[in-house]
Image: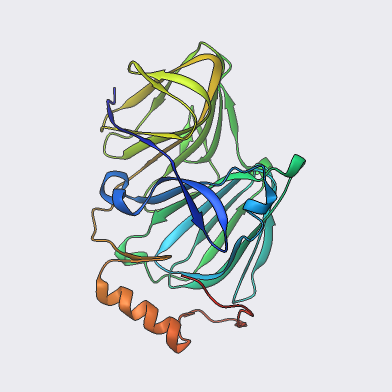
Amino acid sequence: MSKIKKIFKAKPVLEGAGVHLHRAFGYQETSDFDPFLMLDDFRNDDPEKYLPGFPWHPHRGIETITYMLEGSAEHGDSIGNRGTIHRNEVQWMTAGSGIIHQEMPKPGSGGKMYGFQLWANLPASQKMIDPRYRDLTADLIPVVTTNNGSMVKIISGEFNGKKGPVKDIVIEPQFLDVSIPGNSELELPVERSHNCFIYAFEGQADIMSQRVGNRQTVLFEHGESITIRSEKMGFRFLFLSGKPLREPVAWRGPIVMNTNEELRRAFRDLKDGTFIKTDGEKTDPDVNIYY
């Protein structure tokens, strides 16, 4: 059974054009969470604190995974892709060689806009692959109900013999949304060689005699499983594990490469207008790019 390595409390940060969110982990913790780079919790009940959104900005060398619980997010990029993800939907975006895009949140019921964005690293061999999108509607995400009433949504990876819709990712990610009813216990298997953590966002639980609640991240030592016992009101969390890349990280803003020279080249490309490497009908963003 995996032991607890660290427990973090998410910190409030201001991002984009003025979006208030909480960062579970980020730049300072890359070695602990490898292959994951960052997790942001953007749950908010006040539209004034999120409607400014994330105007045109670049990405290269990473994947961004956005999971919506309430509200929606409209996205578009500089090579003509457009779309919207809604409640219980996922956008898995592979930036690869580079895109310039924007993400603009919209309120749902009662002004709520709830969700998460995870950044996953790409290995050196895939940093410059063509960008791609995988928009996953709720009906594509399998849900497993266990004998004790726990519900597990499988975005990627496998649980109880069912597999999520996101496949063929080199880091072999397991991404689950897990709900455990009150006073119940659930064991989740983990690949021993993977880094694994959970992010709590509803209720409380007991994990190896440690009480864990809203906006806390629990990072685990390597092991074959984790066991979580919910308290009276139940417990809901994101479960993530992935195969570590163990590669050097050169990171500035929304671009993550392996060397400082690659990073400098990316920003030269932005300045020179050669950042987008793929074919297609390229369009120039009508606002300044922030990074």
Left or right position of 142 against 239? right
Left or right position of 120 against 109? left
Nearest to the observer: residue 125 or residue 67? 67
Q: Residue furthest toward the right?
A: 109
Q: Image height check: is 20 above or below 179?
A: below
Residue 151 in sight here: yes
Residue 198, percent from left and from top:
42, 34
Residue 23, percent from left and from top:
45, 47
Nearest to the observer: residue 155 or residue 44? 44
The N terminus - image quarter: top left
What coloring was used for the rendering? rainbow
Q: Residue furthest toward the bottom?
A: 272
Nearest to the observer: residue 90 or residue 130? 90
What is the quadrant of residue 110 in the picture?
top right
Residue 168 in sight here: no
Q: Image height check: is 97 above or below 182?
A: below
Q: Image height check: is 140 above or below 271?
A: above
Number of numbered discs present? 0
What is the quadrant of residue 128 in the picture?
bottom left
Q: Residue at x 60, y 77 (%)?
A: 79
Q: Residue at x 45, y 19 (%)?
A: 205
Q: Residue at x 53, y 75 (%)?
A: 289
Residue 16, percent from left and from top:
54, 62
Left or right position of 45 against 248? right
